[in-house]
Image (cartoon, helix red, strand yellow):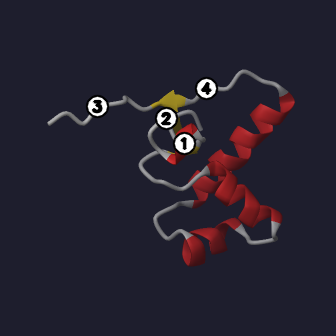
Amino acid sequence: MQSRIAINPRILHGKPRIRGTRIGVSHVLELLAAGVSPQAICRQWYPDLTVSDVQACIAFANQWLSGEELHVTRDAVHANRT
């Protein structure tokens, strides 16, 4: 899970997201809460995701809610300088 979930203050206002995407963990969890299966999330909502990505979102939420130490990758922040 650690490598699948990332935080970058410049993407999604620093909210946890699936690495390499702008898809927030909360977006995936909302779909799951609405009864959408992980397979349907990947097939109908976010075709770039895998079931493993969805499972990583669930694991992240579980760790956060249980108060466990979270291991989230922070993306490097690069300033756009011209």
Cα distance between the residues tagged 2 and 1: 5 Å
40 shown above or below 76: below
70 shown above or below 44: above
Cα distance between the residues tagged 3 and 1: 15 Å
Residue designated by label 3: 79
Mark 2 falls on what kind of element?
loop
Identified at 49% across, 34% down, the residue is 9
Residue designated by label 4: 71
Q: Amino acid at mark 2?
A: Pro
Q: Amino acid at mark 3?
A: Ala
Q: Is residue 28 left or right of residue 42?
A: right
Q: Which is closer to the viewer, label 1 or label 4?
A: 1
Q: Position of residue 66 (x, y in %)?
A: 85, 30
44 shown above or below 6: below
Residue designated by label 2: 9
Identified at 75% across, 42% down, the residue is 61
Cα distance between the residues tagged 2 and 3: 12 Å
Q: How many residues crowd mark 4 within 10 Å: few (<14), some (14–19), many (20+)? A: few
